[in-house]
Amino acid sequence: MKQFIITEDFPMNELEFDKRFWNEQACYDYLFKNRWPDGFVCNQCGNSNYWLSNRKLFICTNCQFNHSLTAGTIFNGTRKKLTLWFKALWWFTTRKTGISALTLKSLLGLGSYDTAWTWLHKLRSCTIRDKREKLSGTVEVDEIYVGGQHSGKRGRGSENKLAVVVAAEKKGKKLGRIRLQVIENCSGEALMPFIQANIASGSSVVTDGWNGYNKLKEKGYTHQQIHQAKAEKKESVLPGVHMVASLIKRVFLGTYHGRLEKKHLQRYLDEYTFRFNRRNTKHVGKRFYRIVQQSVNTMPFNRKSIIFGNISPLLAN
Ligand SMILES: [Zn+2]
């Protein structure tokens, strides 16, 4: 029998979490382990020896370069305790529908709503990985509109609504993983890059008769195009994506009361995708662990760049 070695280290439940991450040092050690899983490595010279300064800088014994554990991470420049951040991370990842800024503010006793709001956006930015495995097998794709009362028609009638393309893996009658992306419009030029970035070539892609999907075969996919009869409801033609669509609409109406701004929508969708794709994770702590791993590899951005929709990270000093 194959030996199974557990290398993932995370708290299994809230009791374990509270017991473990009760002080700064414990959080600090955990971040260290996730940032340098094989031990400290100087990013300038590759040396693995360091000494720790009073200001908690890791100083390379070879080239003297100073490394801060939190520089270049979402915790960059924070004046708040890591124990607070960890608690926010825990709630964000383990609560079924996440946590609102207002709730986070009061639970942590943060001074301002803005701080809680910014923290949550930073955490959302950690919900996707660059090298995610593409969806494969049979995948349903369709576009939906978010933010309006009624679903709009393609290419027009979509004022105040945001177009989102949904891809959902089919595993028999069940759903596998999903991907969600805000798109400018529903043209082939907008849809095809999403499909190529998120669905493995050779997969079988199921869509309706919209001509935005005409180039699927050309791009190396098997295309199952379902032409719906006029009287037929879209839900019965593409049941997977429409189940996802109705779940999203419910969450967004419930949690955010339908108030969504275009510039923030993608991050909410990323958070939703993260939760959805890990809905069957056995231990809630594993989701926490994933976000910590991402948090030490995600460049920080400040509140201003979140508000103005520019999510390109600021360079860490
Ligand atoms: Zn060095």
Image: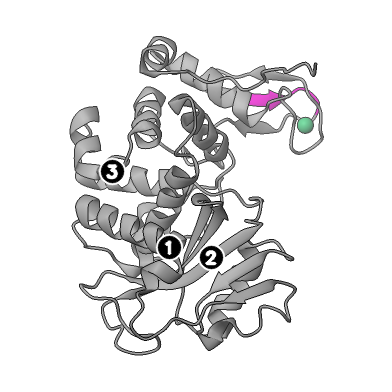
Q: Which residue is mark 2?
A: 140
Q: Position of residue 279 (x, y in %)?
A: 44, 39
Q: Nearer the viewer, residue 178 or 274?
A: 178
The magenta span reads: 58-62
Magenta span main SS: strand
Q: Give how far apart the Cα atoms at labels 2 and 3 are.
A: 38 Å
Q: First in sequence, mark 1 or 3: give its number.
A: 3
Q: Which residue is mark 3?
A: 115
Residue 119 percent location from the top left of the image: 35, 43
Q: Secondary structure at mark 3?
A: helix
Q: Toward the viewer: 142 or 261? A: 142
From this view, report whether residue 55 is shown above or below residue 226: above
Identify the residue under disc 1. 239
Give the secondary structure at mark 2: strand
Its colouring scheme is one colour
Is the residue under label 2 in contact with that under label 1 (CB below 8 Å)?
A: yes
Residue drawn 74% across and 32% down? 42
Q: Amino acid at mark 1?
A: Pro
User: Is any part of residue 38 visible from this angle?
Assistant: yes
Amino acid type of the residue tagged 3 in the rendering: Thr
Nearest-to-viewer mark from 1 and 3:
1
Residue 164 visible in the picture:
no
For the residues labelled 1 and 3, say whether their Cβ atoms are less than 8 Å apart.
Answer: no
